[in-house]
């Protein structure tokens, strides 16, 4: 279970504000308008439902091609990357997300058509990148659509993509209408491809449910405190850095960036622009890149340090002393995992001394349950912050104009 | 040659400020204190010097392992990623940068010891990640040090790593003392590994020199305008977004983030904290992630849209109309490159309409010379901004404390 420590001053937080966030969440949850709270429980049945399918496709496919973008790929990639080292036998997942022709061609070259299951994911069903790439795959790989066992559709009930799936008798899964794209990783969006690939998604769901229950039992008050602190200090600190110490967090960081940025960058009820800017960093690499700005630049950022206490990989720095390089011998004989944890601690201390607002999330180890907990943690933190900002956390009206302008370019 | 268009209002910029930045750069250049200005010319000799070596190692090695972090890896990775699609025969480069044990193990497993050239890069010579990984590689691959042809060292003259190299009679290259790590990509740091891998580094250098000469001939005034605009608006817009439309820009974006963040996040002469925060995004992917925050969140960001007009890859969206999915037919028959460029334009228009400060960099095509130009462009932009902020652009005093705390943990 991860350990959460807020190093910033929580004593001055207004008790009324803290309760306001919690109450708003309870209301959302009980109203049924917002559905992600139900997923850790409801998706258990989904895992059970697709287990026969998993065993069946086991025989035919060794690769899963996920065609989706944004909320339809980021969460899958995050869990895939985090669990891959401890699930080496999971099927290869190839992602088609960007309209970049170089990437599409590169990924197509990694696919053996006869051994690949194609999963097309779009909540609205009309995403231009996803549909264009899907068409490209149909032609390039000469896919037969009708009654195909090789194509699987995940979309909203009644969407154009779902109607298409039914027309061609394709297997399809539904995204609950009250679950937004960026909150959908524990719905069919993430659970279907990850389960079929062979990841232990049940444990992810259990971890998520555990965290939710602890939160509702008021045993995870630090989340409420952090949301309250971030929102009430947003004018002075408009940026929130996640400094995560492992390359495995690269995609998780991108998932957090979407969740946080797209949920909270909004006009509030008075039409004012509000929002907090997420920044994802990887340690120790970004100590050599971004750290200087945090330490000596303007104090306009909060910083969350995330690290994994125990690693499954035991790799030692050899007890080797090289002439003239004795200066580095102080870490001889320790593990790289010890080093990266010590670097995280040392950097956190130096950032604290610089005067920045810091909190720390320590994973005991990288396992499925912890990932589920962290997903719920970030989703709850986002919902709480949105409630305190008095915005609609779950829509994204700002991205529509660009889509209209794009369509206008091609109007005959 | 890339085309630069500042869409923000440059009319109100103070002519005195514009000249001040330019004068400061001239002074730096002529004083000899700052060396990166000389690299596009001086490194040509380096490419010629190592050509025999390139032909020699051609026979023995098919992989180059680069051991380095921050300024000793980001620039190499950026150019490698951008040029890889058009240089498919370049040798594989494997990067060891992070102290993450999972990554180190993963990369070690990709190496055939007998076919790999190891290049160890550290400007100071004492980087703890680099030296620890180097020791791990020596033990794991049983590398014999003395007179080894398989190990190559790049470091400052007289550094402990250079002394080590001489002790063991290893081939080594020097980083000029007046070239900082994050400005070193066109020095031996980038030129040696990339040339040995088979990339056309001469054309990169020529592009860089061309841009420098045009800048000095006052034919690239937009750089000065942009630096001036960014600095004078830094209180209201403390964040600068690079929104680059191709997955190939992922590492280039990280290189810009280091260059910009570490150079400009400083205390100025009065001890005040100044700095601008860089944010790297990839289009079209991040239209589905970060765009909402730009459009409706606080107007606290400038946004640079970068895209590539012509692609070497001609990949079409098929003229395929699928029942119920006709909505997406408006892009049928065009190329994915056309789509991604149109997405960039449409998004830029929507961001402009939101009131944000926007500029645009259009690459005619992705080639070596354009990469060289863009490197110089960003380096000059950084130097100009630092001069206007009245800081030392080239040091990084803020990162020292963390290193001392780390060493303290292991003091016996």
Image (tube, coloured by chain):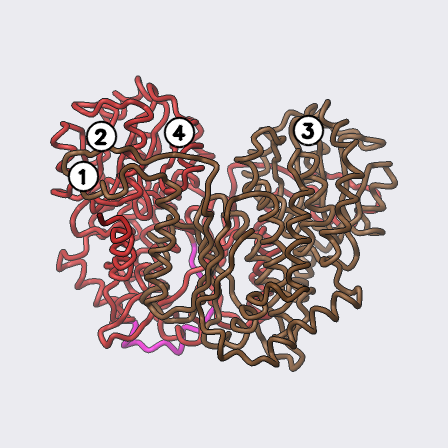
Chain colours: A red, B brown
Q: Nearer the viewer, mark 2 or mark 4?
A: 4
For the residues marked 4 and 3, what is the alpha-carbon distance in whole angstroms? 29 Å
Q: What crowding class fits label 3: few (fewer than 14 Cα within 10 Å), some (14-19), or many (20 or more)?
A: many
Pick the residue in front: A58 or A408: A408
Q: Secondary structure at mark 3?
A: strand
- Residue matched to label 3: B116
Q: What crowding class fits label 1: few (fewer than 14 Cα within 10 Å), some (14-19), or many (20 or more)?
A: some
Tag 3 subunit:
B
First along the sequence among labels 2 and 4: 2
For the residues marked 3 and 1, what is the alpha-carbon distance in whole angstroms? 50 Å
Q: Position of residue A311 (x, y in %)?
A: 52, 41
- Residue matched to label 2: A50
Tag 1 subunit:
B
Residue appearing at x 75%, y 56% in the figure: B38
- Residue matched to label 4: A108
Instruction: Find out whether the residues at labels 3 and 2 contact each other: C-beta distance under 8 Å.
Output: no
| Location of the C terminus of chain B (image quadrant) | bottom right
First along the sequence among labels 3 and 1: 3
For the residues marked 1 and 2, what is the alpha-carbon distance in whole angstroms? 27 Å
- Residue matched to label 1: B325
Q: Nearer the viewer, mark 3 or mark 1?
A: 1
Residue B147 highlighted magenta (yes or no): no
**Residue stretch in magenta:** A3-18
């Amino acid at each position: 279970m991860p350990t959460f420590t807020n190093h910033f001053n929580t004593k001055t937080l207004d008790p009324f504000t803290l309760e306001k966030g919690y109450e708003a969440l309870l209301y959302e949850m009980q109203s049924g308008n917002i559905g992600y709270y139900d997923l850790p429980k409801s998706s258990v049945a989904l895992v059970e439902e697709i287990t026969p399918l998993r065993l069946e496709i086991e025989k035919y496919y060794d690769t899963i091609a996920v065609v989706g973008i944004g909320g339809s790929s980021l969460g899958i990639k995050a869990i895939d990357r985090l669990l891959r080292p401890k699930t080496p036998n999971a099927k290869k997942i190839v992602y088609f997300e960007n309209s970049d022709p170089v990437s599409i061609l590169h990924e197509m070259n990694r696919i053996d058509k006869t051994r690949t299951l194609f999963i097309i994911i779009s909540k609205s069903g009309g995403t231009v990148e996803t549909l264009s790439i899907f068409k490209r795959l149909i032609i390039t790989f000469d896919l037969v659509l009708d009654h195909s066992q090789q194509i699987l559709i995940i979309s909203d009930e009644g969407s154009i993509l779902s109607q298409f799936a039914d027309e061609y008798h394709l297997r399809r899964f539904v995204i609950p209408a009250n679950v937004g794209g960026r909150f959908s990783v524990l719905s069919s969006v993430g659970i279907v491809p990850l389960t079929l690939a062979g990841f232990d998604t049940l444990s992810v769901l259990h971890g998520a449910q555990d965290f939710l229950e602890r939160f509702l039992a008021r045993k995870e008050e630090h989340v409420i405190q952090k949301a309250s602190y971030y929102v009430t200090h947003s004018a002075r600190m408009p940026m929130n850095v996640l400094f995560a110490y492992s390359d495995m967090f690269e995609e998780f960081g991108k998932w957090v960036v979407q969740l946080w940025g797209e949920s909270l960058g909004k006009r509030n009820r008075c039409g004012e622009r509000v929002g907090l800017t997420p920044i994802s960093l990887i340690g120790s690499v970004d100590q050599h890149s971004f750290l200087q700005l945090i330490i000596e630049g303007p104090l306009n950022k909060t910083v969350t340090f995330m690290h994994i206490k125990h690693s499954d990989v035991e790799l030692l720095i050899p007890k080797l002393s090289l002439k003239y390089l004795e200066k580095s011998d102080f870490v001889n004989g320790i593990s790289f995992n010890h080093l990266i944890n010590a670097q995280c601690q040392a950097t956190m201390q130096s950032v604290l001394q610089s005067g920045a607002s810091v909190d720390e999330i320590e994973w005991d180890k990288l396992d499925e349950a912890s990932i589920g907990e962290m997903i719920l943690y970030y989703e709850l933190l986002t919902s709480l912050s949105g409630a305190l900002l008095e915005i609609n956390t779950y829509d994204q009206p700002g991205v529509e104009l660009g889509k209209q302008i794009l369509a206008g370019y091609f109007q005959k």
